[in-house]
Image (cartoon, rainbow, N blue to C red):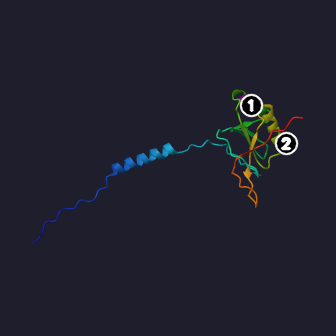
Amino acid sequence: MQFPRKQRRSPALNIIPLIDVLVVLLIFYIATTVFKKAQHKLDITIPTSKHVTNAPDTQPSTIYLTKDGTVYLDDQLVDPDLLGDMLKTKKAANPDYKVFLKSDGKSTFDMMVKIMDAARDAGIDNLQTYATPAAAGPGSPDNSPSAPAPIPAPSNP
């Protein structure tokens, strides 16, 4: 005796709910992404320091000094002789204006002093510099990574 066979339906995957879930995940990832402020792309090797402090929450302007003596204020090429005037203008607009100095370890000390003098003339007494922490040796405290180290303003005689 032959029994009638039922035709089998091929299994189907409903794609609409899958697309809905993927869209929700995509929206979640886009909403939670941290957008980073772009920093100027220069080839600078930051010197090391044993004493490093944490960076502040606000993003100050950064003066970049390359090993060939080129000076940038944030992402703008600046003539070192005009740097003081630019800093004075920004300091006048914002009394809490802060500046960091990120210089190459092979840059000349003469240019660093010129930049520090320009900042001091603009009324910025606490020019901070970036440094990479030195390797912790025996008996030395552990330092926080890659934060600017403050340079105290010299006292005027």
Would you name the residue on which mark 2 appears?
110
Asked if one can make out residue 45 in the rendered structure from this viewpoint, the answer is: no
Residue at disc 1, secondary structure: helix
Judging depth in this view, the residue of 116 and 40 nearest the camera is: 116
- Compared across the picture, whether 22 is left or right of 124 comes to left
| Magenta span dominant secondary structure | helix
Q: Residue furthest bottom?
A: 1
Mark 2 residue crowding within 10 angstroms, few (<14) / some (14–19) / many (20+)? few
Q: Quadrant of residue 79?
A: top right
- Compared across the picture, whether 18 is left or right of 10 comes to right
Task: Give the residue at x 67% y 41%.
Answer: 56
Q: CA distance from mark 1 to mark 2?
A: 20 Å
Give the image location of residue 70, x and y in percent. Answer: 77, 41
Judging depth in this view, the residue of 10 and 118 nearest the camera is: 118
Residue interval drawn in magenta: 85-91
Would you name the residue on which mark 1 appears?
86
Give the image location of residue 98, x and y in percent. Answer: 71, 36
Task: Give the residue at x 74% y 32%.
Answer: 87
- Compared across the picture, whether 61 is left or right of 157 comes to left
- The correct choice, above or below, for 5 with respect to 58 in the image is below
Give the image location of residue 4, x and y in percent. Answer: 13, 66
